[in-house]
Image (cartoon, rainbow, N blue to C red):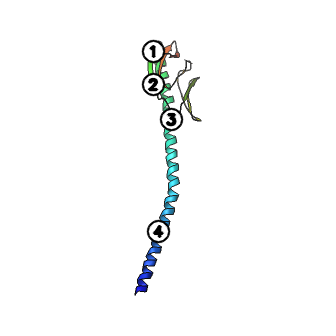
Amino acid sequence: MSMSVSANKGQASFEFMIVIIFLSILFAATIPTLGDRQVALTEREVSQQGKAIADTIAYEFDLAMAQGDGYYRNFELPAEIAYSDYNVTVDNGTVLVEWAQTQRFTGTAASDVDGEIEPGVNAIENQDGTIVVVEE
């Protein structure tokens, strides 16, 4: 009888070890997939931030064009995109936002822009159809 109980305990221990090994392998295989998914979601969110900045600038320029000569407005942009500095270029009706080897752009009705848009507070004025970035 003691031989049978001892064999059952050994069998149970062996089965428990197999289950633990199987779960460990399953866990190890799942972790990289979850990490990759998180990285992709973060990259998408950062890309959307860049696009939102470009869209904000285009909106402000389009609003200034629609309001006509003499229109003046302040607007604010984030200081960084995902802890990275960024640059804004406006050329021939295109607003381009660049950061960390990434870029996003959008179109605008304003084809003639004088001055540079910077992170932080910006002031623009429509002067006879030219959008002028006003130094403050």
Q: Secondary structure at mark 2?
A: strand
Whichever of callouts 1 and 3 sits on the residue coming sooner in the sequence is 1
Q: Nearer the viewer, mark 4 or mark 1?
A: 4
Q: Calculate the distance from the C-alpha at mark 1 to the C-alpha at mark 3.
A: 33 Å
Query: Could you tell me which quadrant the N terminus lies in?
Result: bottom left
Q: Residues at badges 4 and 1 in contact (C-beta under 8 Å)?
A: no
Residue type of the residue flagged with mark 3: Tyr
Q: Position of residue 63 (x, y in %)?
A: 46, 21
Instruction: In the rendered view, tell whether residue 102 sits above or below residue 62.
Output: below
Q: CA distance from mark 3 to mark 2?
A: 17 Å
Q: Are marks 4 and 2 in contact (CB under 8 Å)?
A: no
Q: Is residue 136 left or right of residue 92?
A: left
Compared to residue 81, the image places residue 65 above or below, namely above
Give the residue type that dot 1 points to: Tyr
Q: Secondary structure at mark 4?
A: helix
Mark number, residue 83: 3
Residue named by callout 4: 19
Q: Nearer the viewer, mark 2 or mark 1?
A: 2
Sequence-first disc among 4 and 2: 4
Identify residue for label 1. 71
**N-terminal-most mark, 3 or 2:** 2
At 53% across and 49% down in the image, what residue appears? Answer: 36
Q: Percent x, y for residue 40? A: 52, 45
Q: Which of the marked residues, 2 or 1, is nearer the chain's N terminus?
A: 1
Three-letter code for the amino acid on which mark 2 is drawn:
Glu
Q: Nearer the viewer, residue 52 or 128?
A: 52
Q: Which mark is residue 76?
A: 2
For residue 51, which numbered disc appears in the image? Answer: none
